[in-house]
Image: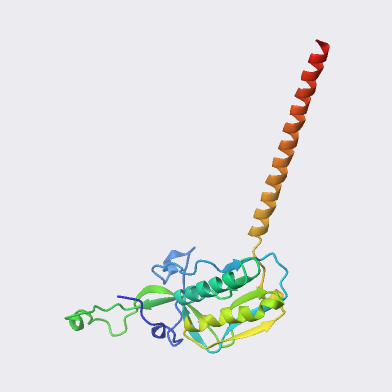
Amino acid sequence: MGLRPGRCYSSLKQRPYTRIAIKVPERNYVGAVPPLRIRQFNMGNPLKDYTHVVDLIAEEGVQIRDNAIEAARISIHKFLQNKIGKDNYFMRIRVFPHQILREHKQAQGAGADRVSQGMSHAFGKPIGRAVRVRKGQVIMSVLVMEENIELAKQALLRAKDKLPCEVSVRVHQDIASIGTRPKRVVEEEVVEEEKKEEAKEEKKEEEAKEEKKEEKAEDKKEEK
């Protein structure tokens, strides 16, 4: 069976199902947790000193599946990469899919009405993950410079076709609201610089050794 429409899972009426006990397995109400479909939560260049933040805001309380957020992420990321460049923005997904979706799978085809009969209130099995978003909550944020604000707005509004709710865009200058930016990139750059410096020092040492050898060879020639 193919992927069902997002409207089948967007309602918040269903009871939250997020209990995953790692340290105490006997209290684990979730039999198995489906894999996360969001591949990245941070994209772009986090090292630049940006001036503005563009937020994508949900205009209604809704449940959004992780595959919808991933589709929106890919669309926004490709647009910004092509229009602005990968080093001129930083994007972060501000929500995490804690909600685990469950479904009582039913047989399809001829005779399915007899096969599908069973519990009238079946608890179901885990089939995916979703995010429970309240009205006015930020879904994604993009850090850009002032000259790229309009392009960032266009990129975020491309998510309207991917998400099961109405969205809006807000621009502000509260850079701290996005939280701590990744430091891994900085550490990698420091390591690379240290390696380059070590390589330069090794070259200098080799050159000095060669010069000493040449000087010794010249001294021997003069002695002869």
Q: Position of residue 152 (x, y in %)?
A: 62, 78
Looking at the image, residue 78 sits to the left or right of residue 175; the answer is left
Q: Specify how the rendered protein is coloured.
A: rainbow
Question: Which quadrant is the N terminus positioned in?
Answer: bottom left
- Residue at the farthest left position: 111
Residue 126 shows in this picture: yes
Q: Residue 89: where, in percent of width, then height? A: 64, 70
Q: Is residue 52 visible in this depiction of the protein?
A: no
Q: Give the quadrant of residue 3.
A: bottom left
Residue 193 vs residue 18, the one in the foreground: 193
Q: Position of residue 149 (x, y in %)?
A: 66, 79
Q: Residue at x 51, y 72 (%)?
A: 74
Q: Is residue 33 left or right of residue 190?
A: left
Residue in the picture at 80% in, 10% down = 224
State whether residue 23 is above or below residue 127: above
Nearer to the camera, 198 or 127: 198
Q: Quadrant of residue 213?
A: top right
Q: Residue at x 51, y 84 (%)?
A: 160
Q: Residue at x 38, y 69 (%)?
A: 31
Q: Position of residue 21 (x, y in %)?
A: 47, 67
For the image shown, how many numbered marks are present on the structure? 0
